[in-house]
């Protein structure tokens, strides 16, 4: 089996999007990485797709894009069609339960970043496979 993969998926920007993204990650990675890595990557992808739906793409804008590349490490990019997302971290004193997605990605990834333009937002992370 070739350990390298490259996969690009279009995810509808609706309430099912995060679950679809988790299933895609499971299908692509379940026989390639340890369970704990798979669970972490599923959680990070779910958080980023949720952000892409909530802060970026709408049905009129088009799908959220999920780009997975594996070659010794997992590199994932989530792209949406909006620039309505501001990089902001939540604090423990914030009252509601939402808004922790980027902190989750920061904690679970080995490296991550964000690029914003007027046309799109791209958030990416790298996670070692071992």
Image: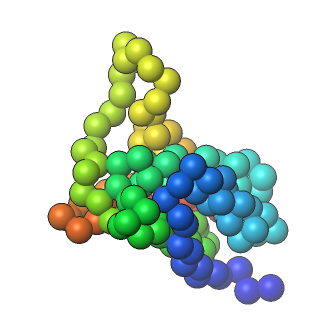
**Which of the 4 quarters of the picture holds residue 128?**
bottom right
In front here: 90 or 11?
11
Locate residue 83 relative to residue 72 in the image: left or right.
left
Q: Is residue 111 visible?
A: no
Q: Residue furthest left?
A: 118
Q: Is residue 96 visible?
A: yes
What is the x, y in percent for residue 86? 25, 45
What is the x, y in percent for residue 59? 43, 63
Looking at the image, which residue is at 41% across and 15% down? 95
Looking at the image, which residue is at 28% across and 48% down? 85
**Which of the 4 quarters of the picture holds residue 28?**
bottom right
Task: Report how many numbered discs are placed on residues in the image.
Answer: 0
Against 85, residue 92 (above or below) is above
What is the x, y in percent for residue 110? 49, 53
What is the x, y in percent for residue 34? 77, 57
Locate residue 76 relative to residue 23 in the image: left or right.
left
Locate residue 112 relative to residue 7 in the image: left or right.
left
């Amino acid at each position: 089996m070739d350990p390298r993969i490259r996969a690009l998926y279009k995810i509808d920007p609706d309430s099912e999007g995060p679950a679809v993204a988790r299933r895609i990650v499971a299908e692509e990675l379940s026989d390639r990485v340890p369970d704990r890595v798979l669970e972490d990557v599923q959680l990070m992808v779910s958080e980023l797709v949720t952000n892409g739906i909530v802060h970026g793409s709408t049905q009129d804008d088009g799908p959220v894009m999920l780009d997975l590349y594996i070659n010794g490490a997992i590199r994932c990019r989530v792209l949406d069609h909006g620039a309505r997302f501001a990089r902001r971290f939540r604090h423990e004193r914030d009252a509601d339960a939402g808004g922790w997605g980027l902190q989750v990605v920061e904690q679970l990834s080995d490296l991550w970043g964000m690029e914003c333009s007027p046309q799109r937002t791209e958030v990416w992370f790298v996670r070692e496979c071992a």
